[in-house]
Amino acid sequence: MTPRVSILIPAHNAEKWIAETIRSAAAQTWPRKEIIIVDDGSTDETPAIAHRLASAHIAVLSQPNQGAASARNAAFAHCQGDYIQWLDADDVLAPDKIEKQMTALRRCESKLPLLSCAWGRFAKRTDRATFTPTALWCDLSPVEWMLRKMEQNIYMQTTAWLVSRELTESAGPWDTRLGVDDDGEYFTRVLLASDSVRFVPESRAYYRDSGSGSLSQIGLSKRKKESQLLALELSIAHLRAVEESERVRAACHACLQMYLNYVHPLEPELLERADALAASLGGQLAPPVLTWRHTLLKTFLGENAAAGARFRYSKLKAALKSIRSI
C-alpha cells in the first residue's frame, strides 16, 4: 500500500501566509496524504482562513496559545501518517517535494533513514528564492551531520525534512519549554535516532525570510537567550550520549563559543552556565571579538546602549536584504 504522509502545520497569527502554505501542501503530487493545521490561539483571521480551506483531507484543530512546540505535538497526536512533513505556517513546499523524497526512499538501503532536501529563502515569490548550499547538503552519517552543523554554525530548515513515523516516535515530543531553537533540539534527537541522512537535491522547500536575521530573532530578550542556551545544552547532551570523543567535544565547544555573541557581557547568569558547560567539554570560552562599530559605541554610549544598537543594526540590515530579494 502507498504510504500515507501527514503534513503538519502549527499556526499562530499567520493570516498573511497561511492560505499559500495550505495550498502548497494540498498541491503535493504524492497521492496519499493528510493535512492537519493546529491553530495555536490566533487572534487574527488565521483560523477562519484555515477553516475555509478545510476538506476531507485537510483538518483544522484549535487550542489555546501554548507555543509552536505544543501545536506540533497536538498535530502529531491526531495524525495517521507513515511519514511526517513538518511545515511552518509561512513556508511553502514545491509541488513534488514529498514525491521526490519518497521516490529516493525506495533506493535507500538503510532501515531508518532521515530525508532532507534543498531549501531556499524567499520574501514573497518562490520563483525568486535563493538556494545556498552548505556542507549539510549531502548524504551523511548522523554524527557527522551534527559535527558539521556545530562546527560551521549551519543548519537544515525544518520544512526540508521528511521523517518516518518510527523515527518520530523514537525521538519523542517537541520540548514545550523551548521558544527559540526548539527545532534545532528536536531534530538533534531525530537525527541521532536515525541511521543515515539522505539528501535529495531534486526535492525543494521554501523558507519565507521575514527580514530578521539570527541575531534579531533573539535580540535583547533574556527569555529567548535562556531558551537558546537550554536548547544548546540539551543538544550537546544528546550528541555526547551517542559519541563521547575529542572531535565531538571540539565541535560542541565551537558552537558554544558562537552562542557567547548573544549573551556577552549583559547576561552574567547565562555566561556562568555557558562557562560551566565549556569546562565540561575540556575547554574555556574566550570573550567574543567585537567589531570596530561595537567598540566605538561601547566607548561613547556604554555596553547596554551598544548592545541595543547592535541589535537594531542587525535587524535593519536583514530587513533591507529581504526587500532586495522581493
Image (tube, rainbow, N blue to C red):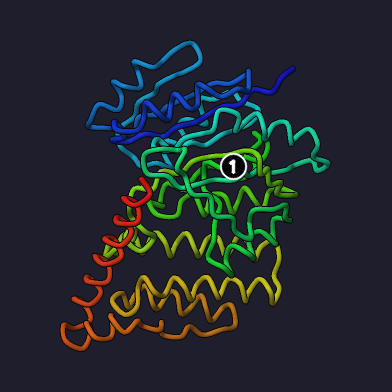
Quadrant location of the C terminus? top left
Q: Residue furthest left?
A: 301
User: Within the image, what quadrant is residue 214 found in?
Assistant: bottom left
Q: Can you say whether 6 is above or below 72 in the image?
A: above
Quadrant for the N terminus in the image: top right
- Side of 1 relative to 32 (left or right): right
Disc 1 crowd, CA 10 A, few/some/many (<14, 14-19, 20+): many
Residue found at the far top of this picture: 56
Q: Position of residue 67 (x, y in %)?
A: 36, 42
In x, y percent, where is residue 295?
28, 85
Q: Residue at x 38, y 77 (%)?
A: 271
Residue 135 lies, in percent from the top left, at: 63, 60
For this view, does 324 lie left or right of residue 248? left
105 or 223: which is nearer to us?
Answer: 105
Which residue is rendered at x = 80% and y = 43% of the image? 110
Name the residue nearer the viewer: 105 or 43: 105
Outermost residue, bottom side = 299
Position of 254 relative to 57 (above/below): below
Q: Is residue 258 above or below residue 176?
A: below
Residue behind mark 1: 161
* Amino acid type, residue under disc 1 in the picture: Trp
Residue found 34% across the figure and 33% down from its top: 17
Q: Secondary structure at mark 1?
A: loop
156 to the left or right of 248: left
Q: Nearer the viewer, residue 139 or 134?
A: 134
Residue 150 percent coordinates (x, y) = 57, 66
Which of the 4 image quadrants contains residue 116? top right
Location of residue 309 by image quarter? bottom left
The residue at the far right in this view is 109
